[in-house]
Image (tube, coloured by chain):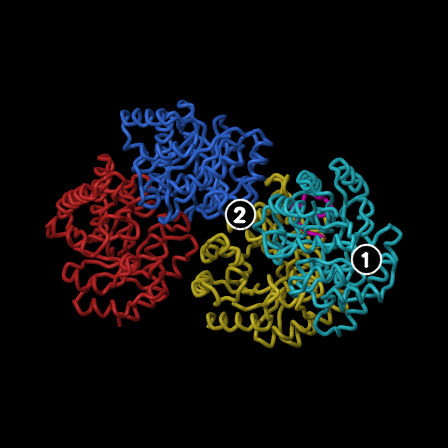
Chain colours: A red, B blue, C cyan, D yellow
Amino acid sequence: MKLSFNNWVYSSFPVWVPAYPLEETIKRIAKIGYDGIEIGAAAPHAYPAYVSKDRRKAIRNVLQDNNLEVSSMLPAPGGGPGFNVASPLEEERKAAIEQYKQVAELCADLGGGTLLYVAGWQIYGTPRQQAWDWSREALSEIAKSVGAFGITVAIEPTPTDSNLVESCDDAIELMEQVGEGNVGLMFDTQHAYYRNEVPTDYVYRMGKNLRHLHISELGRGAPGSGKGDFVGLVAALKDIGYNGYLAMEIGFNRRDVEPDQIARQAYEYMKNLLK
Amino acid sequence: MKLSFNNWVYSSFPVWVPAYPLEETIKRIAKIGYDGIEIGAAAPHAYPAYVSKDRRKAIRNVLQDNNLEVSSMLPAPGGGPGFNVASPLEEERKAAIEQYKQVAELCADLGGGTLLYVAGWQIYGTPRQQAWDWSREALSEIAKSVGAFGITVAIEPTPTDSNLVESCDDAIELMEQVGEGNVGLMFDTQHAYYRNEVPTDYVYRMGKNLRHLHISELGRGAPGSGKGDFVGLVAALKDIGYNGYLAMEIGFNRRDVEPDQIARQAYEYMKNLLK
Amino acid sequence: MKLSFNNWVYSSFPVWVPAYPLEETIKRIAKIGYDGIEIGAAAPHAYPAYVSKDRRKAIRNVLQDNNLEVSSMLPAPGGGPGFNVASPLEEERKAAIEQYKQVAELCADLGGGTLLYVAGWQIYGTPRQQAWDWSREALSEIAKSVGAFGITVAIEPTPTDSNLVESCDDAIELMEQVGEGNVGLMFDTQHAYYRNEVPTDYVYRMGKNLRHLHISELGRGAPGSGKGDFVGLVAALKDIGYNGYLAMEIGFNRRDVEPDQIARQAYEYMKNLLK
Amino acid sequence: MKLSFNNWVYSSFPVWVPAYPLEETIKRIAKIGYDGIEIGAAAPHAYPAYVSKDRRKAIRNVLQDNNLEVSSMLPAPGGGPGFNVASPLEEERKAAIEQYKQVAELCADLGGGTLLYVAGWQIYGTPRQQAWDWSREALSEIAKSVGAFGITVAIEPTPTDSNLVESCDDAIELMEQVGEGNVGLMFDTQHAYYRNEVPTDYVYRMGKNLRHLHISELGRGAPGSGKGDFVGLVAALKDIGYNGYLAMEIGFNRRDVEPDQIARQAYEYMKNLLK
């Protein structure tokens, strides 16, 4: 298993400041000891439309110089353009699908292979089945398209924020309905804890389809600062032979966090568990 | 003085759910009694690129049928595209300026006349003066451009979230440097309270340049639910002869809020003060 | 009985901001309805060395134009110069006595007649009796000197902050030892509550020697916002025929207070009790 | 890097008691292990007008006997005389400048070389630019004058308490405008945290101009008792080659603190980090 750190807390998403350029963020995360960085596709780090081909090469060089992999990428849903794949607006659904494709291409350009999929949310007035169908269609199209870049898509249940793919089973159902070989699963301990569910249950249920994890205490604290059972989680992951990334997605939901500090605390705690 | 309600808590920005279509939101806000709606330019309500000319007409009809004005519009800064006018990325700055222009056009199409300006934020590594200059240049270009739509731009200090235009004096300084006739000022009581400043001081300092207000308790509660002095604020506004809008920008920063309830509480409290 | 408002919360003492010029403060307090203002002798309002004779006349005119009396004045102990009458430093004791005399002269120049006396505090290493004697000697000298200005001195027990004159009985003892006709007593409900004592006990114990009162909830909230028994206090004051000032000394100990708001709240609550 | 302890919590400023004589304070701080003492210029410790030349020699002897340096001195702004260099009162501004000069001379007499500069605060009615100009003029005059004593002046941003020099960038701008060789910068982690800013950003931004630091948790707790990242701060300071003082400015804002205890806790935590 490898450790990665999600860039939100070093970025302007969703909290505007503090924010560091991507190159600076790469150096800091690498210096702490992480194997990888998870890059959210938001400005100023990695909004695809703002990142020229030349700059992609330059970023890739910084990654290589610092011996850091791109563990994964994800879009930044919920801002002005929404990027809700289950929106009642056709314009928004199209833009969301296009954005996923662009994020996947950027991910490939930076040497990454995993794209996270947030299944969208149901707006008042849209029947659940309709929202689900739009999300399934979006995922089918995205999966087919990004296969060309060698990208795997991992569906993430997000009950803390949404109302559509809320559980381990929802994610499994969506994956099976889409039935594309490059679509797998992931989960975030924050979201499992939000529903008072047990992360190790997700590990065994997702099994060989588990492609990625987000690690966080409930409330987005660093693992080890709250009451999450990461000892048990690591044991379950070893048990199923998981050898992918554990990405810390923490601290980004409030302004009063020092990015380096929370990155370091999480690293030290998790590194010790993986010994 | 007139009362308006900001749409964030009925939208998907920044919290994804609950979210209501714009037409539904207009009907609810009008029914409570508000004179106007403040529309943030985020999906699914009003991201300019998603709102066709036909749909603009349809929305305008719904507004007229419900006797509700568009008091003001504002972009949704901080999401994937950032729209930070002080970003070190030239691509982002250009996109931000373009977005402001599009929001102004949409505002005019919906019958509104006031555009709020968030001056951006300083990314680590950008000297403050450079960030300030980029913001000033952006505002100059925006102000000149949107004058054609009859739009007034109101600069808002946002210390809760940013690090660039933090105070009443910063906003005044920016306005004076830009020196365009359609650039004025606004403030949000939340941001004044965040700095432990006194809103009535802002009223007297901004004086005849005051074009708009955001009303909120510290923490985004409805006015009257906390310790803000809205009695004194209304008295000061009467004292300077202010006759514009008071827009409630509340409740949107967390999921556990019922939009209709907080809109109603704010309306009842403020309506009574304006008698 | 008359109502007065202490200027600290409109001044820079001890919290630096917000701060309003004295003339502005006079206008605001008068507009709310108060009969008097209590002026603490701190910059920028009334540090004696900074207030020329011409400015004293100008301030007196503003007071008269606004129909506001100076109910009382007091020094600002505890800052750089300390002004601790019980200090082990002879330089400080002399400066403190001189400061009291200057405050008394300023008070008279502004039309006031009451000077509050804070008896100082004991520094580690000074025996209590020595500190007491220095304070008594200081008060004797001050009382004799300020009689020429027609000033009455009122001793205030200050247990919240000090360690010398801590109770009603300490103040009485000091008054009796000094034995000057222009030395009386006062108390502050905050300080009585700090010791879990009963303010009406102070009223009856101080009786005809009671010259002044400070009104505050424990913690410096406006009367009526906490659990203080101001109904009972007013009844006791009527019972002994007290016809002096009740000065609100509130809100000044923290930054997040709106001066006008707390002044208005206290006025409305107390005015109603005095009917 | 060396460790120093600020005397406020042993002094009468701003809380009157407990208070210890300066000589006693020196002995206690030295005994705990500190390399230096930061002396605030308030009674009874070090109000310049109260400290004769003979007493200065005596204090210097006590310092030498206890092997303790004077790391720095600072005035005590905000009390009766205010000493606000941006006051609208000319008398106060002059007194403030004179006080800075006297503190610098006292500092030199006690063997110290660093004077901290608090840039003042804006009173209602004073335009920000005017307040800024007064502060800049004051600093120019002070810097020129105290150069004769070999004193370096370090500008401190103080957003917790003020409204003028609020950020790292404000301090840099003021330093650059003054352009005197003996004017540098400092920061206090309390003030950075108050703005939810990251202290290591201040370290890299101030760089070679960084002359001094105040160490404190948000709320003035001892470092290590809260959530401040002092591990990261020390690493950044080593990274830029800082070899000056870290002065603990803690515990002084409330009465219920034991000075020796908080001094010892801070020392033990920081000493361990510096190993």
Tell whether D221 sits left or right of D105: left
Chain where mark 2 sits: B
Between label 2 and label 1, give the one nearer the viewer: 1
Residue A126 is marked as none
Q: Secondary structure at mark 2?
A: loop
Chain where mark 1 sits: C
Residue C208 is marked as 1
Most common secondary structure along the magenta stretch: loop
**Do circles 2 and 1 both sit on a common chain?**
no
Residue C47 can be seen, yes or no: yes
As measured in the structure, the alpha-carbon distance from the residue carrying label 2 to the one carrying label 1 is 39 Å
Tell whether C152 sits left or right of A127: right
Specify the segment rendered in magenta.
D81-92
Give the amino acid type for the residue marked by disc 1 in the picture.
Lys
Residue A166: say if magenta.
Answer: no
Tell whether C8 sits left or right of A241: right
Question: Is A69 or D11 nearer to us in this picture?
Answer: D11
Quadrant location of the C terminus of chain B? Answer: top right
